[in-house]
Image: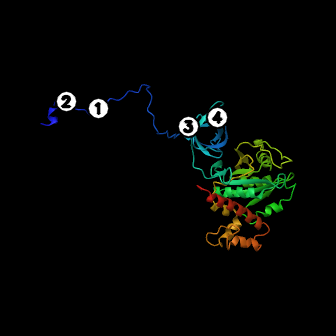
Amino acid sequence: MSWLDDLDDDEPEFDEADVRVRPNPKANRPRTKRRPAHSDAEIARVLGVDRGRYTVLVDEDLPSERTVLAARARELRKTPIVTGDRARVVGDTSADEGTLARIVGIEERTSLLRRSADDTDQVERVIVANADQMLVVVAAADPEPRPRLVDRYLVAALDAGIRPLLVVTKTDLADPAVFLAHFDGLDLEVFTSGREEMPLERIGAALVGHSTVFVGHSGVGKSTLVNALVPEARRATGHVNVVTGRGRHTSSSTVSLRYRGETGNGWVIDTPGVRSFGLGHVDQANILRAFTDLDEIAQECPRGCTHLPDAPDCAIVEAVEDGRLGPGGAARLDSLQRLLETFAKRAQEPGA
């Protein structure tokens, strides 16, 4: 006889309906990873960031346009939100005093300008989103112009897919011709500005229809230029230390300001002045592309050419030696090689 025969035929059978469910003592809804769709979210432009609060513009270019204060939703705590972002905003967007909306998402970005602490640091810092132009501001003197810093701006702009422009201020103090010769052959629109002659109409015309991020070394007159283009901006201006030759940081945050011109509007994005601009995040292939004339000649180089001083049969080196690139050719090649050498050393580091 099998032990199965000892079972009582009257033993009740169990099914799923007999499973006891533990009651929810707190009477709250179970947690879920499903997030609300926020189909009613409004799209707003992020104008500035201040201590965890975001100033956003809702209904841009409409009669109902208004500036709203917003906080970041919890699910975005690991997502960087920067000036220029197009944010999805819910909650109270009336802009009434004491109200606070909530940013629940970020629209896909068309561009992202970044920099790192130095060339060996691949941890990037996002500066601005969705800009399509970069206006590099440099002084002809006081402080002295730094061609290699401008080179770095150009590389970062090209890496981000942003068109660069150049403004040389304080031309009443020094002739910028030698400095500008460094950029001969580059596809770069240049404006010059002095105390008595500031080409606001020409610069303003270049801003219409664009979102332009202003960058530059501290003390070059960037904030002065911003205030002239956007009078209501009231950006703080400073001076240059006569001992160190360095400018004092005046703009402490990145903000978007609307430019209103006679032929149309645009956006000016003012950034704090910097004394260094690391390119640790940049694709090395984009470095040569920033030097337009050198990139064209590089097509004649042997495959795998490093363009460094010891590179055999480098067409760029030969063109500079033959004087085909003008008086600024040697300086541009030197800047290119310095950047390439930095990246070559980084690639040889352990873990690179």
- Residue position for label 2: 11
Question: How many residues crowd mark 2 within 10 Å: few (<14), some (14–19), many (20+)?
Answer: few
Q: Residue at x 76, y 45 (%)?
A: 230
The first of marks 1 and 3 along the sequence is: 1
The first of marks 3 and 4 along the sequence is: 3
Judge from the rendering whether residue 19 lies leftward or rightward of residue 7; answer left or right.
right
- Residue position for label 4: 95
Instruction: Tell me the amino acid under the disc marked 1.
Output: Ala
- Residue position for label 3: 74
Disc 1 to disc 3, C-alpha distance: 39 Å
Instruction: Tell me the amino acid under the disc marked 4.
Output: Ala
The first of marks 3 and 2 along the sequence is: 2
Q: Quadrant of residue 49?
A: top right
- Is residue 48 visible in the rendered image? The answer is yes
Question: How many residues crowd mark 3 within 10 Å: few (<14), some (14–19), many (20+)?
Answer: few
Q: Residue at x 76, y 67 (%)?
A: 330
Of 46 and 279, the residue lying toward us:
279
Disc 3 to disc 2, C-alpha distance: 53 Å
Q: Quadrant of the C terminus?
A: bottom right
Instruction: Tell me the amino acid under the disc marked 2.
Output: Glu
Report helix, strand or loop for mark 1: helix
- Residue position for label 1: 17
Q: Residue at x 70, y 51 (%)?
A: 212
